[in-house]
Amino acid sequence: MLYQPTQETVGIVRKLRRGLNGLGRRHHCCVCGRTFFRFSKFRGGWAAVSAYLHNVRWTGSDFDHFWCPFCRSHDRERHLILFFERLGFWPRLEGAAILHVAPERRFAARVEACRPARYVKGDLVPAREGVERLDVTAIAYPDASFDWVFCNHVLEHVPDDARALSELARVLRPGGVAVLQTPYAAGLETTLEDPSAVDTEEKRLAFYGQEDHVRLYGRDLFDRIRAAGFGLELKTHGECLAEIDAARYGVNADEPLFLCRKPG
Ligand SMILES: [Zn+2]
C-alpha cells in the first residue's frame, strides 16, 4: 500500500522545512525581523509569468520573493513599510483619519500601532473582523473625511477605475495623501483593456497578470490618477531606499511608491 501522508505529517514536514529555512542569513523580513534562506514564490515565480508581461516590463510584485516564510508578509507590504519608515510617515498617522481599502494585514497592523484617531478598513467582500463592506466606486463617507487613503492593488480589479479614483479623491481632505500602489507595464504607453479579446481566465492571466484583473495599465495610469485631481509623485526605490538590497529584503526595486496628494 502506498504511504498516505496525514495532515499531521504534512504539518511536521512544513515546520521542519521552515525551521531549516530559518537557519539561513541570506534574506531578511522587515516585518517579523527573521532571516532565512529564501522567500516563497508567488505561484511559479517570475519563470511562470507570461512572455508578454516580461516584454512589456510588468512592474508590481516580486514573484520570486513574495511571502515571508515566517509571518507571511507580502513583498508589497514590506516595500510600503520600508518607504513609510524612510519618508517619516508613521508619526504622521498618529491622530489622523485613515481609510484603508482592501487592507493588507501586516501593513494594517503597523498603521494601527500608530494610533490613528479613526481607522476605517473596507473591502467589497469583507473577509475578516474589523473590515466593513465598502465599494470603492461609491464610498459611503462624506467629502474630505480622511487625512490618508491607502488603496493598494485594487484599481486593476475595478471596471470603472475613473469612478474609483474620483471617489478616493473626494473623501480625501485637501492636503491629504493617498497611496495607490498599482501594477503596470513600464514598457506600455497605453493601458491594455479589451474585454472582448481578453475574455478568458487564461488570457487575463497572460495579458493582465491575474485572472481577476480587468486591465493591464500602461504608463497612462499616471495620467488617470492625475485626471482624478491628485498630484502624483512617484518615489523610486533608488531615490528613497538606495542602500536596501531589494532581493535580500524581498521587495521589487522597480516598484515605485505612488504618492498622491490632493491639492489644498
Ligand atoms: Zn516575516
Image (spheres, rainbow, N blue to C red):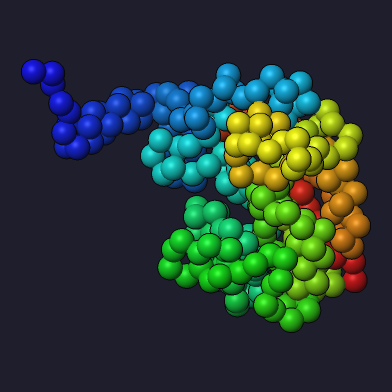
Q: Position of residue 115 (x, y in %)?
A: 55, 71
| Closest to the observer, 42 or 246 | 42
User: In the rendered view, would you say 132 is above or below 28?
Assistant: below
Name the quadrant containing residue 202.
top right
| Closest to the observer, 80 or 45 | 45
Q: Residue furthest front?
A: 196
Q: Residue furthest left?
A: 1
* Tag count: 0
Q: Position of residue 207 (x, y in %)?
A: 70, 31
Kindly identify the residue that appears in the image at 60 percent across and 48 percent down: 81
| Closest to the observer, 109 or 163 | 163
Kindly identify the residue that appears in the image at 83 percent across and 40 percent down: 191
Q: Quadrant of the C terminus?
A: bottom right
Res 217 visible: no
Q: Residue furthest bottom?
A: 142
| Closest to the observer, 198 or 147 | 198
Kindly identify the residue that appears in the image at 8 percent across and 18 percent down: 1
User: In the rendered view, would you say 201 is above or below 230?
Assistant: above
Kindly identify the residue that appears in the image at 73 percent across and 54 percent down: 159
Q: Position of residue 44 (x, y in %)?
A: 51, 24
Q: Position of residue 246 (x, y in %)?
A: 63, 30
Res 4 visible: yes
Q: Is residue 52 left or right of residue 111?
A: right
